[in-house]
């Protein structure tokens, strides 16, 4: 590439190249080795998610991402405090800048793509500091003994250092999975966290209020234990008056949430199997035929991950501008209830723009206030609750469509990149010339339209699951992501095994 046409990011690349990184394997990695790395990374992830931040006063700490905790693949008060937030946020910024041509990089060019990935590492560190510093100075309070030992400034600095190191190690583990393992590390972490939340939400035998005796007002927290307890202890009169309502509607983990979770599993599994298959034949080997599948969920679950990370950051900054001692004094933005209103000791918006963009927590959070506002305890009118549902669903769908288009173009899934990949493998569409431009025109009939449909469908499914509710507070987006991640992981395992049996297939699948 000519020096004068290079992006300005090439001036930053020498700095980002010096950052710690995971080296890509020089040759083919055996399937068993890849699975071993995946298991090792998962074990390390769960260990870090259970290691508390040293010197943190857990009783006074507030979790800014409580509503999005499962899909952020983190754990409050631990080394995984930030989760995948900085990684995803940095990816959003880079994709937006590349897509809008503010950063002039051609990601189909190997050199430009290397520059993109190198600078992304530096931006991840910037976002780690950008997200950890406000939290420590506002909502993660050092313990009094820790402050007495190293001072308030030193205590805050050490907490920031622990959170930053944990987040960067998570980024390196994502690289380990993507280069030495199978699939995406980010997706793996999300699936692990959501699966844990679903398991405990369904089978937790502990009472809702720990330390108190079981009662109708304090049944087991898990869906199935709650149902068993109520059916075993309630009289017919109690069942008809309040038992069924507690089982099916009352938080946490009502039966309706478990049914919604199962429905999302079935719908996503069906949609993942829906695809268009273009016939292919080998240009030099007669009789050698194949098919190129274009899935209905073409952009995978990435658009929902990016959209959820964006909404999580909006919620975080709305809370900071409303309640932080320094930021709340900023004119127009500070303490502005139109941007977001938060009740004391709460991280979930109670009003303003942040409330309209936050995910409802099941039907008791929006449908009951619309149908019977007098008993719901919701301070908003039925019209405002209805507007919240419409705005949230619309933003999720439109945002997911936008991110789907950006993702397809920046990850070599667009018509031109796919045409070049098919051409390189020696395949062609029967009846058409063996020319990448011809292949590109054929693929342009399908891929752009399917990309838009893919983003709209995953956005609508995530919003629907949030409206219905899920067990374990896993969030609709989390359940949607987990189903897709598990299906893709299973397919990736099958692809790896095929390449293991037939090395010729590695070239077509992009293997070494």
Image (cartoon, grey):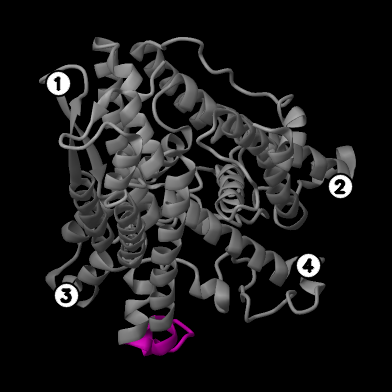
Q: Position of residue 149 (x, y in %)?
A: 87, 37
Q: Position of residue 495 (x, y in %)?
A: 28, 24
Q: Which residue is mark 4?
A: 327
Image position of 253 (left or right of 178): left
What is the spatial separation of the Cα atoms under label 1 and label 3, in whole angstroms?
66 Å
Q: Is residue 386 above or below residue 325?
A: below
Residue shown at the point (19%, 45%) measured from the top left:
276
Q: Earlier in the sequence, mark 1 or mark 3?
A: 3
Membership of 378 in magenta stretch: yes
Residue shown at the point (34%, 14%) measured from the top left:
31
In the rendered image, which quarter contains the N terminus? top right
**Span highlighted in magenta in the image:** 372-385
Q: Earlier in the sequence, mark 1 or mark 4?
A: 1
Q: Which residue is mark 2?
A: 152
Q: Which residue is mark 1?
A: 288
Q: Quadrant of residue 219?
A: bottom left
Q: Quadrant of residue 258?
A: bottom left
Q: Which residue is mark 3?
A: 240
Q: Can see residue 56?
A: no
């Amino acid at each position: 590439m000519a020096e004068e046409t290079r992006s300005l990011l090439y001036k930053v690349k020498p700095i980002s190249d010096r950052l710690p990184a995971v080296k890509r394997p020089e040759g083919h990695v055996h399937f068993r080795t890849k699975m071993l790395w995946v298991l090792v990374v998962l074990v390390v992830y769960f260990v870090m998610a259970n290691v508390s931040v040293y010197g943190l006063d857990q009783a006074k700490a507030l979790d800014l991402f409580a509503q999005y905790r499962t899909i952020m693949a983190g754990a409050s008060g631990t080394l995984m405090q930030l989760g995948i937030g900085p990684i995803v946020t940095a990816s959003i910024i880079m994709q937006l800048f590349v897509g809008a041509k503010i950063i002039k990089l051609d990601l189909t060019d190997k050199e430009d793509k290397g520059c993109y990935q190198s600078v992304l590492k530096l931006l991840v560190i910037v976002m780690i500091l950008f997200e950890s510093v406000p939290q420590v100075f506002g909502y993660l309070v050092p313990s009094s003994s820790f402050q007495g030992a190293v001072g308030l400034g030193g205590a805050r600095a050490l907490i920031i250092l622990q959170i930053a190191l944990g987040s960067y190690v998570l980024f390196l583990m994502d690289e380990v999975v993507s280069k030495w393992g199978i699939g995406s590390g980010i997706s793996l972490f999300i699936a692990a966290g959501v699966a844990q939340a679903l398991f405990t939400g369904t089978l937790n035998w502990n009472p809702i209020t720990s330390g108190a005796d079981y009662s109708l007002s304090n049944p087991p927290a898990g869906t199935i234990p709650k149902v068993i307890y109520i059916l075993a202890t309630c009289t017919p009169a109690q069942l008809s008056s309040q038992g069924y309502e507690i089982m099916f509607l009352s938080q946490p983990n009502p039966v309706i949430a478990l049914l919604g979770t199962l429905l999302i599993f079935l719908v996503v599994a069906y949609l993942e199997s829906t695809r268009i298959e273009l016939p292919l034949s080998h240009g030099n080997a007669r009789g050698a035929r194949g098919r190129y599948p274009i899935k209905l969920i073409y952009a995978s679950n990435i658009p929902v991950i990016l959209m959820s990370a964006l909404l999580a950051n909006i919620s975080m900054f709305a809370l900071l501008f409303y309640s932080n001692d320094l930021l709340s004094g900023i004119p127009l933005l500070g303490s502005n209830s139109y941007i977001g209103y938060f009740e004391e000791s709460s991280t979930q918006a109670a009003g303003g723009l942040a409330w309209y963009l936050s995910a409802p927590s099941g039907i008791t959070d929006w449908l009951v206030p619309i149908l019977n506002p007098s008993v719901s305890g919701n301070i908003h009118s039925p019209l405002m609750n209805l507007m919240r549902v419409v705005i949230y669903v619309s933003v999720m769908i439109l945002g997911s469509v936008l991110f789907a288009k950006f993702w397809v173009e920046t990850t070599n899934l667009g018509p031109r990149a796919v045409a070049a990949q098919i051409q390189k493998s020696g395949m062609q569409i029967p009846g058409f010339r063996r020319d990448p431009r011809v292949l590109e025109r054929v693929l342009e009939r399908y891929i752009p339209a399917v990309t838009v449909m893919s983003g709209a469908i995953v956005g609508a499914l995530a919003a629907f699951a949030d409206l219905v509710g899920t067990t374990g507070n896993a969030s609709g987006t989390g359940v949607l992501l987990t189903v897709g991640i598990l299906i893709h992981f299973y397919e990736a395992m099958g692809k790896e095994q095929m390449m293991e049996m037939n090395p010729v297939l590695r070239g077509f699948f992009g293997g070494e």
